Image (tube, helix red, strand yellow):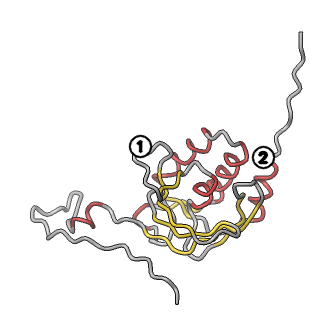
Amino acid sequence: MMSVMLQPSLAEPLAELWAVLHRDAPITLVDCEVHYLTSIALALDDDLLSQLLLKKLRLAQVVQADSVTGSVVRMNSYVEFSLGDQQNLFCQLLHPSSSAMPSYGLSIAGRAGTGLIGLHAGQSIQWPGEDGRMCDLAIVQVANCPGLDRWLGVETGPAARADTRPLQLAALSWATAP
């Protein structure tokens, strides 16, 4: 019988250290996304990333979707951010298996994607870069698409009216600092 020696993972103690360092960081998650993000964390092949996302979920303030501000990174958010020494990057945070992933799409299951979720515009945390070293992950700005009711300019739910207001489209503009 051959004996197999299991190597202990450093992922859990490293994630615990990260959590201690970021225990006061304002991380906000929407209640309807917590279960989804937990399943993503448990399915990740990268043990460190999985543990970090689970710690982030535990540290987060969970709020209802209608009470979250537009400056919080959520699923499908458009985000401008920097990671380490890289210049600012622009992305839309998407599901990992999005069949029509745009060139600016970033998977929630990747290193940067798991780091972005729940952060606020102007916030910076330590997060592992592609090389595994900790570096600054800074959120420059965030834009969240309004719900269908806001795009169409109508009320939804039990109080919805039969008449609809004209379709109003809002242009997403990224103001650049002078």
> Which mark, by number, is residue 12?
none
Type of residue at label 2?
Answer: Ala
Earlier along the polypeptide chain: callout 2 or callout 1?
2
Instruction: Identify the residue shown where x is 21% and y is 68%.
Output: 153
Residue 90 location (% of width, % of height) = 51, 66
* Side of 113 where 51 appears, left or right: right
Nearest the eye: 103 or 95: 103
Q: Residue at x 44, y 71 (%)?
A: 70
Q: Quadrant of residue 76?
A: bottom left
Residue 91 to residue 102: above or below: below
User: From the viewer's perspective, is 163 left or right of 111?
Assistant: left
Observer-nearest residue: 146 or 155?
A: 146
Which is more foreground, mark 2 or mark 1?
1
Identify the amino acid type marked 1.
Ser
The residue indicated by pointer 2 is 11
| Left or right placement of residue 145 versus residue 163 in this view | right
Q: Nearest the camera: 54 or 44?
A: 44
